[in-house]
Amino acid sequence: MPTKSRLFITGGVPLQGTVVSSGAKNAALPILAACILVKGQYTIKNVPPLKDVMTMLKMLNSLGVRAELIQGNGVMIINDRKIRHIAPYELVTAMRASFFVAGPILARTGFAKVPLPGGCAIGTRPIDIHLKGFKSMGVDISVEHGFVQMLTQQLTGARIYLDFPSVGATENVMMAATLAVGTTIIENAAQEPEIIDLANFLNSAGASVKGAGTSTITIEGQSELRGQNYAIIPDRVEVGTLMIAAAITKGDVFIEGAYADHIEPLIRKLKEAGASIDVHNNGIRVYGGNELNSVDIETMPFPGFPTDMQAQFMSLLCVASGTGIVTETIFENRFMHVNELIRMGANIRVDQRQAIIQGVGQLYGAEVKITDLRAGAALILAGLAASGKTSVYGLEHLIRGYHDLPNKLQSLGANITSQ
C-alpha cells in the first residue's frame, strides 16, 4: 500500500492470520553507522526500508561509504575510500539517530564535526552523555554555531560511567572504542537487544566487544575492522504493536520471526490484562478473546517496560475494564497522543508524568492527528478497536519507524484504506 497523507480505518474487525516481523529500525541505524568503521564489501540483511534508514544511507554516502539498497531488504556496503569528517546539517537535523556517526567518524579520522541533532519532539534527549564518554577517551570538544566539533590525536581506552543508561550513548562510545588504543569499559551501559545486535555485528568484523546486554561492556581496541554479511534482528516494537493489535481487536495473530525474550515485559503485561499468548520457536501467537482488564505500567530502560510501547499499550487500556495508570519515566513529553485518544472517547487524565486511564469499553471513530512515531501506532490501534470510521492524519511520522504497518494490518483483515 503506498503511503498517502491519511488513513481511514473502520474498526471492530478481529485480526486473523500470520504476519512476518520486519527488521529493527533501532538496530539497523547504529549498525549502518558502524559501517563507517568496517572496511570492505558486505551486505546488511533484513534492513527495513524506512525513511530514517534512507536518511542514514544518504549520510553514509555523503561521508564516503557507498551504501545502496538491494533486493530483499538488504543494503550493500562498499567501504574502501577516505572518510569525510563533516556530517551534513540537513541529514543530522532530520533524524536524531544521525548523531550515531560521531563515534565512528572520530575513530576513523580523529576529527568529527556534527550538527546538533533533530528528531521527534518527545522530550529532551541530550547528547551530553555521548560527549562525556568521548572526552574520557581523549577528545577535545567544542560547540559553536549549532555544530559539535570533536578532535583527538588518538582515541584512548578509558573507564566510562554513563550517568544514565542511554542506548545511543552506549552505542556511540562502544563504536568509537573498537578502534581506540587499549581497553574501554562502559559502566551503567544500556542493555537493550539492539546493543547486543550492534556488538554482534562489530565482533563479526573483528572487534572485541564483551558484556553487551549487561550493565558493563568491555571493548579491546583493534587496528582495523573488515565486514562480513550480517542480518538485523526483528523489530521488537513492531512485534509489540502487532501483539497489541491482536489483543485489542480480540483477534488471533501469529507473528513470525518474533523473539519473545526481547519483549518479555510486554508479554507479562498483556497476559495480566487478559490476552492469551503462546511462544513458539519461530514466533509468537496472540489471541484476545477474553475481556481485557486494566493494569499499571511504568516505562523503564531494558529489561523494563519499553517507552516505545507506552502509547500503544495506553490504547489497549482505553477499552479495558477498570482503571490503569501509565507512568512515563524516560521522556517528559510522551503523552501527546492523549488528547487524540480523548477525541475518540477515551477517559484519560494526565498528572505530570502519569496518565490515569479509566476504561470506557468502547472507543468511537474520529479525525485524529499523529504527533510522533509511536503515537501514530497508538491511534491506529485505537481505530482498529473503535466503532465507526477513524481518519488518521500525519502519516509522515509513522513511516519513519514502521515498515508498511497499514499493509501488514490489512493482510490480517483490518479495514484500512489510504488517501
Image: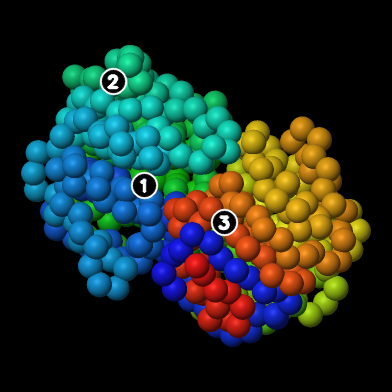
Give the answer, above or below, for where 95 lies relative to 290.
above
The reply, left or right, for residue 365 in relation to residue 30 is right
Q: CA distance from mark 3 to mark 2?
A: 38 Å
Residue at the spot x=18%, y=40% of the render? Answer: 63
Residue occupying the point 43% across, 35% down: 118
Number of numbered discs: 3
Q: Which mark is residue 393?
A: 3
Per the image, the residue denoted by label 1 is 30
Q: Would you place residue 370 above or below residue 232 in this image?
A: above
Q: Amino acid at mark 2?
A: Gln
The disc placed on residue 216 is: none
Mark 1 or mark 2, which is nearer the start of the sequence? 1
Mark 2, residues whose alpha carbon is within 10 Å: few (<14), some, or many (≥20)?
some
> At label 3, which amino acid type do we have?
Tyr
Q: Residue furthest right?
A: 322
Which mark identifies residue 149?
2
Quadrant placement of the N terminus: bottom left
Give the SS element for disc 2: strand
Mark 3 neighbour class, 10 Å CA radius: few under 14, some 14 to 19, many 20 or more: many
What colouring style does the render use?
Answer: rainbow
Considering depth in this image, is 116 or 12 the residue closer to the camera? 12
Residue 363 x, y percent position in the rendering: 79, 64
User: How far is the residue under mark 2 from the one under mark 1?
Assistant: 20 Å
Structural distance between the alpha carbons of marks 1 and 3 = 29 Å
Where is residue 314 shown, x and y percent of the image? Answer: 73, 54
| Quadrant hosting residue 16 | bottom right
- Which structural element holds mark 1? helix
Q: Residue furthest left?
A: 81
Q: Which residue sits at x=53%, y=53%?
A: 394
Compared with residue 292, is residue 152 higher up or lower down, i.e. above or below?
Answer: above
